[in-house]
C-alpha cells in the first residue's frame, strides 16, 4: 500500500538529469556508451534507461547507485 504524505519534490532530480546529460555529452559518449560504462562499475543499465533518465516523460527515477 502506498504511503501517503507530502508530494515528492523533483527539483533535485531535474538538476541531476541535466548534469547527467551534460557530463555524458562533455565526454562525447552516446547513451549506449554511458550504459556500457555504468555496467563496468556494476550498475546494470541500457541505452533506453539512460535516455529515460535524461529525457523521459515522465522521467525515470535516478537511484543513488546509478550516480556513484
Image (tube, rainbow, N blue to C red):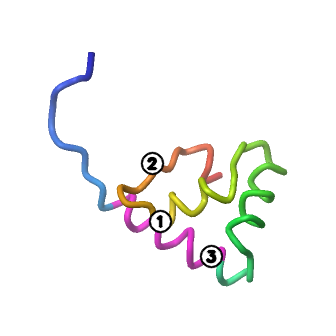
Q: Distance between the residues labelled 3 and 1?
A: 10 Å
Q: Distance between the residues labelled 1 and 2?
A: 9 Å
Instruction: Give the answer, above or below, for where 45 lies relative to 55.
Output: above
Which residue is label 2 attached to? 61
Mark sitting on residue 17: 1
Q: Quadrant of residue 56?
A: bottom left
Q: Which residue is drawn at 73% across and 80% down?
A: 27
Point out residue 34 in the picture as x, y percentages from the top left corner: 72, 64
Which residue is label 3 attached to? 23
The magenta stretch spans residue 49: no
Q: How far apart are marks 2 and 3 (CA)?
A: 18 Å
Q: Residue at x 50, y 66 (%)?
A: 54
- N-term-proximal mark, 3 vs 1: 1
Query: Would residue 33 be found to the left or right of residue 18 on screen?
Result: right
Q: Which residue lies furthest to the top in this view?
A: 1
Tell me where the magenta segment starts and ends, as one range. 12-24
Q: What element carries label 1?
A: helix
Query: Would residue 41 be found to the left or right of residue 20 on screen?
Result: right
Query: Would residue 68 be found to the left or right of residue 61 on screen?
Result: right
Q: Residue at x 37, y 60 (%)?
A: 57
Point out residue 8 in the picture as x, y percentages from the top left corner: 24, 45
Q: What element carries label 2?
A: loop
Amino acid at each position: 500500500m502506498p504511503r501517503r504524505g507530502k508530494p515528492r519534490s523533483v527539483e533535485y532530480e531535474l538538476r541531476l538529469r541535466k548534469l547527467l546529460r551534460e557530463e555524458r555529452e562533455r565526454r562525447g559518449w552516446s547513451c549506449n556508451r554511458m550504459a556500457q560504462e555504468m555496467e563496468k562499475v556494476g550498475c546494470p543499465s541500457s541505452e533506453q534507461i539512460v535516455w529515460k533518465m535524461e529525457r523521459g516523460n515522465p522521467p525515470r527515477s535516478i537511484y543513488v547507485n546509478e550516480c556513484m
